Amino acid sequence: MQQHVTVKPLPFFYVGQAITNNRINQFKTQKHGLLTQALGKSDTCSVWYSKEHFVKLLEEIEFAGGDGIRISFGMYEEGHQYAGQTCLLFNTTRETVVGETITHTDVILELEPDYPERAAQERDIILFPGEDPIIRDFNLGVPCPPFCPTSNPKEQP
């Protein structure tokens, strides 16, 4: 009896290891030094998120009737343990059609009709490896630096 094996195609967003390494190297050689110099300490090179984080994010997009996600670059505020470092901010988007133009508008949770009820609920706790239970939102992962994996030199600034 012949066994049939289905091969899953590569995802459409896959650019390959050479392009990935080149883009990371370009950032590190052209921008990271400038950001680090301006900040006075090593700036963020990467951010790690758990699979659970993305599952919860996809659930939120579905709950909000969203069509995608916008990822923006931001900077941690003074007083934060990573003050001044670059961070990533996730905003669920909804498709908006005006005439023949389709845009993807940010969903602002504070403007949603169910916000007061949702805000009053206890948030989920996501545990990150080696940390005590703390509340994290969709906009906080594990930044490198300071938490860089020592086993992967490509992640080091």
Image (cartoon, rainbow, N blue to C red):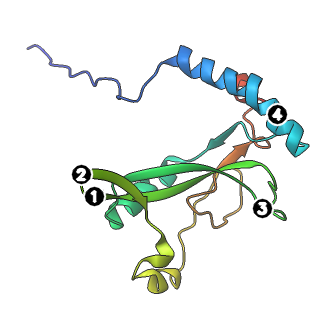
Q: Which x, y percent locates residue 33?
A: 82, 30
Residue annotated with mark 1? 97
Q: Residue at x 79, y 41 (%)?
A: 43
Residue annotated with mark 2? 100
Q: Say which amino acid is labelled 1.
A: Val
Q: Say which amino acid is labelled 3.
A: Glu
Q: Residue at x 57, y 66 (%)?
A: 125
Disc 1 packing (10 Å; few <14; some 14–19; many ≥20): few
Q: Residue furthest front?
A: 99
Contact between marks 2 and 1 (CB within 8 A): the answer is: yes
Q: Residue at x 57, y 60 (%)?
A: 126
Residue annotated with mark 4? 34
Image side of residue 118 versus residue 153, left or right: left
Image side of residue 136 versus residue 114, left or right: right
- Quadrant into which the C terminus falls: top right
What numbered label is drawn on residue 30? Answer: none
Q: CA distance from mark 3 to mark 1?
A: 35 Å
Contact between marks 2 and 4 (CB within 8 A): the answer is: no
Q: Residue at x 75, y 57 (%)?
A: 76
Residue annotated with mark 3? 77
